[in-house]
Amino acid sequence: MSSTLDLEFIQDFTHFEQHVAKLIHRAGWTVETAKPNQPGYDLIATKENLIVAVQVKWLKNNATAPQLLKFADFLDSNEGKKFNSGWFITTKGFGGPAIALIRSWNKDTKIRCGIALENKLVSVDGSIDIISDNHKQTPSDTNLSTKIYFGVFTCKGGVGKTTIAAHLAGALALQGFNVALVDLDPEENLQKLVGDGVFVPNPKGAGTNIQVFKADDWHEDSARDCQIVICDCSPALERNPPELVNRLNYCIIPTTLNPLGINKHGKVIQETVREIRQINKTAHLFVLVNNFKDPGVKRFRLLKQVYLSAYTEIRKTDNKFHCIDPEEVCIRASDLLYYWGIHILENPENPASRLAFDLIGGRCYPREDFINLADFIEREAGIGVLRSS
């Protein structure tokens, strides 16, 4: 049997919704359609004392992490709390970052994700019926043979370069990739934060490794099992080995929505982009807002306008430059990230053996933000080898 539903058979959302409702009803549930234009869910399934919100996604491509996060936010809302759980049902499957997000959620999370086949609804990896089986979903790991290189740059201190490098590595490790972190910054903050590396467990038990290397110790043969290499780059671009800068496939440049610093940061980043392009003409470059704090609707609109306008000229001439809209992807300020940093200050001789990815009430905003970042990079830059499907 095919692992996905034949879209020639289910030609539109209405027919797919009816198909999903029939499968749920066949399993002994009572099913009713949500009110027209009801945000958050499409069907309501009830059985004895259980009530479930069902979101139906008729898609020609894999479901993404942002779609799952939107459903998770609904279930956390006052209206969503009346449901015991939520089922996210799609047609095709789930992209790599979405699978990482599913893997990261624990048993307390209210969402269960599945794919509609012709005769049943199955879990992400196709192994269980999500209606009747309560086991944790454990998507298959992905094996890669090609190394992908990321670089995290900034010419200004204090915007979270090292934190982003480490936690992006964590988000990719949650997808099943072994990741090498290369510390090119003379300050060696990466080793101060995570020591020699971090082990990231997953529900299948094997886990993945984030290995940390000093610049002088780095060689591809030192991390032959790593599919992804993330370089925490020196703020002085000339101190980064040109051969590594030239190998970068993706560069991330963090900044902040500081009201008095946006234009100043923009000029510094413009110069950084020019210097990178002198060595590497093909890498995708991403400007990312870090440590985001919601200033309110009016102030945010103003800050966003100034932020986006700072990079207008670059976008006109460089089609691989991406100024990420903070409404779509940003790294939010959070207590988890704050206390992760405090731990480092209080224990300088004992680097963290784990990232700020602990779950609170079944959720972790830093983990979700970095998985969302990985998803955005995949969608915008087409990281084909990172796709699990």
Image (cartoon, grey):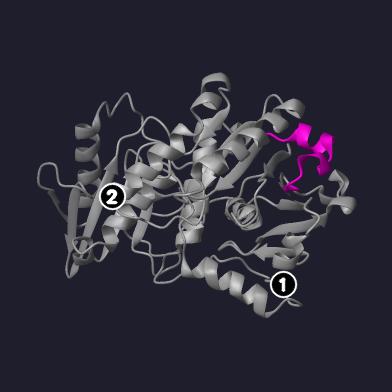
- Closer to the chain start, of discs 1 and 2, is 2
Number of marks drawn: 2
Three-letter code for the amino acid on which mark 2 is drawn? Val
Q: Which of the two discs, 1 and 2, sits closer to the camera?
A: 2
Three-letter code for the amino acid on which mark 1 is drawn? Pro
Q: Is residue 62 left or right of residue 265?
A: left
Quarter in which the N terminus is drawn:
top left
Residue at the outermost bottom position:
346
As displayed, is residue 1 above or below residue 78?
Answer: above
Q: Is residue 183 left or right of residue 142?
A: right
Q: Which region is colored magenta?
A: 232-249
* Badge 2 element: helix
**Residue that carries the numbered disc 1 in the rendered image:** 351
Q: Residue at x 19, y 56 (%)?
A: 45
Q: Residue at x 78, y 59 (%)?
A: 187
Between residue 102 and residue 312, name the one nearer to us: 312
- Specify whether residue 196 is painted magenta: no
Q: Where in the figure is residue 291, as x and y percent of width and height? A: 50, 57
